[in-house]
Amino acid sequence: MLNINNLKVSIDEKEILKGLSLKINKGEVHALMGPNGSGKSTLSYVLSGKEKYQVNGGSVDFKDNNLLDMDVDERANNGLFLAFQYPMEIPGVQTSFFLRTAMNAKRKFNNKPELDALEFAKELKKKSQELNINPDMLKRDLNVNYSGGEKKKQEILQLSMLDPDLAILDETDSGLDIDALRIVSEGVNKARNSENSFLVITHYQRLLNYIKPDFVHIIADGRIVKSGDYSLALELEEQGYEKMAQA
Ligand SMILES: Nc1ncnc2c1ncn2[C@@H]1O[C@H](COP(=O)(O)OP(=O)(O)OP(=O)(O)O)[C@@H](O)[C@H]1O
Ligand SMILES: [Mg+2]
């Protein structure tokens, strides 16, 4: 699904990713953990195609194509999805309109018929109920004046509507209350299947109790310094990054 090899990335001439390699197969859930400023969000931005990041070396293959050659829309249409650490507020764009446009753009690209207003409304109602999202919220502008947790929930609603092949969740758990954390995790678990993959960025082992990853990686200073199974997250919780990064 995703093959990152020796990726080197800088922004404003500051090198952030310093030879990062990571391989994610179809059907796998990988967790990425690491101290503040280690390059987790940078990785997610580079993969999703955000401007300004300069790739100085290495390669990224997504479904056997060169991801770095694709523009942002192409990446999304080909099945890549990023849930932002800090979701953007977009005044003037109603949330439900945004979701429908994004969904139909992807369907069109993949030669599938667009959903009409009724079909879309049905799907949106079902998915928002599953995530315990108040339908009134979807009539408001995208993320504008949403609480921190509501923004994160909206991102997972987007995920479940778009049904991506690879979803990157950047600290989707931060800011969620205990019930929302469970609901959002259930949403992810529901979306999870043998055909798709997830990269879950988090600081807390707690999320991984709900979303059991197949692999856990620790990133420090722009590189993966340790990989393992779920037990690595437990070890990390006990020992902290500093000790683990040295080991
Ligand atoms: N435009 C920029 N100019 C200079 N440095 C930058 C720029 N953008 C990001 N950085 C730096 O890149 C490093 C990596 O940032 P990144 O957001 O990827 O960290 P992170 O691992 O996601 O951290 P956190 O856990 O706090 O979310 C940080 O030291 C940050 O200050
Ligand atoms: Mg970050």
Image (cartoon, rainbow, N blue to C red):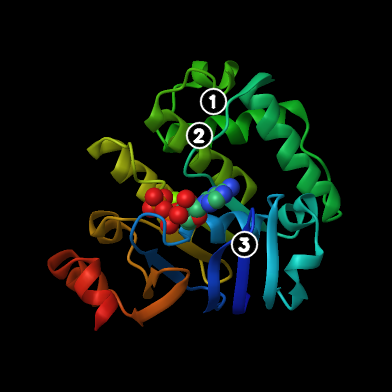
**Residue 169, image x, y percentages:** 48, 53
Q: Are marks 2 and 1 in contact (CB under 8 Å)?
A: yes
Query: With respect to residue 129, does 168 lie above or below?
Result: below
Amino acid found under the numbered disc labelled 2: Gln
Which residue lies under the disc numbered 2? 154
**Residue sitting farthest toward the front:** 13
Camera sees residue 181: yes
* Mark closer to the chain start, 2 or 1: 1
The residue that label 3 is drawn on is 10
Which quadrant of the figure has residue 113? top right
* In the image: residue 78, left or right of residue 17: right
Residue 106 picture location, percent across and down: 77, 48
Q: Residues within 10 Å of mark 2 (few under 14, many from 20)?
A: many
Q: Where residue 79 appears, x then y in whole percent?
A: 69, 59
Q: Pick the quarter of the image with the N terminus.
A: bottom right
Q: Which residue is under mark 1?
A: 143
Residue at screen point 57% across, 66% down: 196
Q: Nearer the viewer, mark 2 or mark 1?
A: 1
Mark 3 crowdedness (10 Å alpha carbons): few <14, some 14-19, many ≥20: some
- Quarter of the image for the C terminus: give it: bottom left
Residues marked 1 and 3 touching at CB (< 8 Å): no
Residue placed at 47% from the left, 59% from the top? 40
Does any atom of ligand 2 lie closer than 8 Å to the CB of label 1?
A: no
Please tell me which of labels 2 and 3 falls first in the chain.
3
> How many dots with numbers?
3
Q: Are marks 2 and 3 in contact (CB under 8 Å)?
A: no
